[in-house]
Image (cartoon, rainbow, N blue to C red):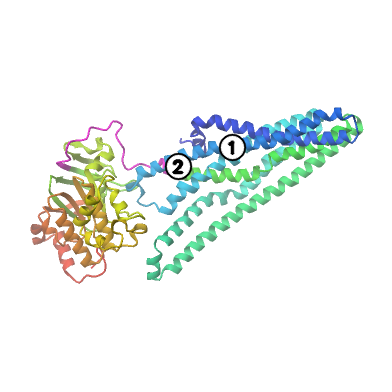
Amino acid sequence: RPAHPLARMRAAVGRLRGRFVLALVLGSLALGSAVGLMAVSGWLISRASEQPPVLYLMVAVTATRAFGIGRAVFRYAERLVSHDAVLRMLADLRVSVYRRLERLAPAGLREARRGDLLSRLVADVDALQDYWLRWLLPVGSAVLVGAGAVGFTAWLLPEAGAVLAVGLLAAGVCVPLVSGARARRAERRLAPARGLLANRVAELLDGCAELTVAGALRSRVRAARDADATLTAIASRGAAATALGGGLSALICGLTVAAAAYAGVGAVHDGRLEGVALAVVVLTPLAAFEAVAGLPLAVQYRQRAARSAERVCEVLDAPVPVREPAHPAAAPETPFPLEVRGLSARYAGQERDALTGVDLTLTAGKRVAVVGPSGAGKTTLAQVLLRFLDAREGGVRLGGTDAAALDGDTVRRFVGLCAQDAHLFDSSVRENLALARRDATDDDLRDALRRARLLDWVDGLPVGLDTLVGEHGARLSGGQRQRLALARALLADFPVLVLDEPAEHLDLPTADALTADLLAVTEGRTTLLITHRLQGLDAVDEVIVLDGGRVAQRGPYAELVAVEGPLRRMWERERGPVGGLVGQPV
């Protein structure tokens, strides 16, 4: 049985355990100083009212100063140590989550949404600090200081100690249980609601222009507002539970102090307690309740942290689409021939294979086009070649070496990708290109742009290579974004280049022009072109038609288009009336 997420968070402390123990000791000393300050101050005031020689009061005066200073010093030291330990732990945890996301992407995050992933990486990881700072450490300090206060009060007056013990148990156990039960449902919904709001806002900001043009901006704003209202309502229910806990704690504190005072007055009357000590018996419970006053809220923080820990563990435990070898094999001198034999692949959680029994051979300079309808398995083939997804059966060999035995980064030094959604960073043309080769000179960058048919456009810009492209390339047209992504792939000079739907979402004239340029620039370069369009495919060496994850046809384009079959039907549809974007039904 897997460990509880919070137990895993405690186990993750590791080398920082000593810091947390020190923080617990310092926090207990700070609370103990507060109790001691109140008790000694009460005794000092009562004793001073009898006007004894001042030397009789010096110990109490010194103790009062010591407790007053100690309370501030110990609290400062506790905050310093505990926050340092927690921030170090969160940094390690956030790196672990990011590394897991890195291993899951892109094949393992097909259904994940960016806003929710960001919420898990930031908000949920941050929420775990409350488990330590507002639950474990306060509870530990409350137990230690509460036990000490009860013992001290019982030493002075047993019945007052019993009253204090009952009051602390009621305020420190019963009240948190009541307020926690009221807040439990709200706390479980809080983290998902926060993730939903983050996703709604991210979608709204990313697609503001498109939503405005489509007339859907108002509905998306309304959806974001509804998500915010839901989150506010959940937070309000949590605040109501907090208020209930605070009110009950204050009531129990008052009743306890009153009961202790009643017991103390009776003891003074019976001669079992000195009158000077009565103030100590009354004020010590008042100070001791500081230790448990925050526990109702602490329970809610624990519930919130538990839900966040579950969401973080969902990422950490998600099945990775690729298992890296413990001892990677040596990289081959050349990836050729790149052989795919009997390849079957399936995404996690899917009941059927996305690819079944696919064979493919790429030799140096050979160009192969893979075509087929959406869902045929074309992109899955690219992800297997790039080791973003493991084969379920069969496999891929690079230069005679099983790709599964190689480190993923090694495979991706041989096989590069230019995807339909290639990411452009909010930086300059130069920086976006230099991602492919940090040592590239301006001449190298310009050569890549020339081959991608983008150099004339860049030369016409006021600042040339230093022109900012905007977030996701927002300042570029669709064709310019794809050409810039292609230039980056060409600059990397991969031995095998995979072009995954490079003309997707472009208007037909732009798509056909881009495809023609792609085929021209990749002449003599080993290329796997994944596309919906058939325009220009007579220039490739082989066409593979996928349908339902299986190879339906393969061979030269001229032969396939001349016989009845899937490719011929695609060709006939493409020749008919078309419009809109590539990949839309005609």
Q: Element under label 1?
A: helix
326 in relation to 123, above or below:
above
476 shown above or below 15: below
Q: How far apart, in angstroms, are the residues tagged by discs 1 and 2? A: 21 Å
Q: Left or right: where does residue 352 sit relative to residue 280? A: left
Residue displayed at 48% across by 57% down: 197
The spot of residue 26 in percent (x, y) is 63, 32
Where does label 1 land, which residue? Answer: 80
Residue drawn 64% across and 53% down?
Answer: 240
**Residue under the image location 45 percent in, 69 percent down:** 218
Question: Which image quarter: residue 509?
Answer: bottom left
- In magenta stretch: residue 161: no
Magenta span includes 337: yes
According to the picture, the residue beneath numbered tag 2 turns out to be: 94
Classify mark 2: helix, strand or loop: helix
Rendered-image quadrant of the C terminus: bottom left
Residue 495 in the image: x percent, y percent?
Answer: 18, 45
Q: Read off the magenta span.
A: 315-339
Estimate the x, y position of residue 131 in percent, counting from the top left.
Answer: 56, 41
Crowdedness of circle 2 by 10 Å Cα count: few (<14), some, many (20+)? some
Task: State whether the magenta stretch is mostly helix, strand or loop.
Answer: loop
Q: Position of residue 416 (x, y in %)?
A: 24, 47
Does residue 201 sit above or below 58 in this rendering?
A: below
Amino acid type assigned to the residue bearing label 2 in the image: Arg
